[in-house]
Amino acid sequence: MKLVITVVEDNDVAFLVEALVDKGFQATKLASTGGFLLQGNTTLLIGVEDEQIEEVLSIIRSTCAPRKKVIPQITPELPTAIGVPIEIEAGGAIVFVIDVNQFWKL
């Protein structure tokens, strides 16, 4: 058995959870914060059998694809001034797959 720990942007999490549930997977949601500009993230814990890893990774890839986003540039010297907009990459997912020695549902 494996535990898939997935960190995704809050904007993507509803689509990911819906896609996982449609395929019969369950996930536990944990609110988290971090990354560029300290935007909201959600961490999902997904327990799967070894042979289901590729299917779960495929669902994550298809629902959490990276995309370009334009944000206002803020300079540390003048935090209230808004500069020229810059393009950043948003979305995507950070995924950890770890072995589970024991699983108990109590």
Image (spheres, rainbow, N blue to C red):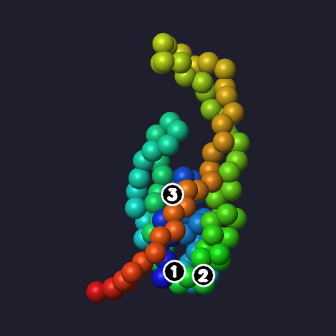
Which kind of residue does numbered mark 3 sit on?
Val
Closer to us: 99 or 65:
99
Quadrant for the C terminus in the image: bottom left
The residue wearing badge 3 is 7
Residue at 65 percent of width and 75 percent of height: 54
Q: In terms of secondary structure, where does tag 1 sit?
A: strand
Which kind of residue does numbered mark 2 sit on?
Gln
- The reply to whether residue 13 is visible in this rendering is no
Up-down relation of residue 33 to residue 1 (above or below): above
Give yes or no for contact between labels 1 and 2 (Cβ–Cβ under 8 Å): yes
In percent of width and height, residue 79 lies at 48, 18
- The reply to whether residue 33 is visible in this rendering is yes
Closer to us: 9 or 93:
93
The residue wearing badge 2 is 52
Up-down relation of residue 41 to residue 4 (above or below): above
In percent of width and height, residue 36 lies at 52, 38
Q: Which image quarter: residue 101? A: bottom left
Horizontal arrangement in the rendering, residue 87 relative to residue 82 (left or right)? right
Label count reads 3
Up-down relation of residue 25 to residue 59 (above or below): below
The residue wearing badge 1 is 48
In percent of width and height, residue 66 lies at 68, 51
Residue at 42 percent of width and 47 percent of height: 33
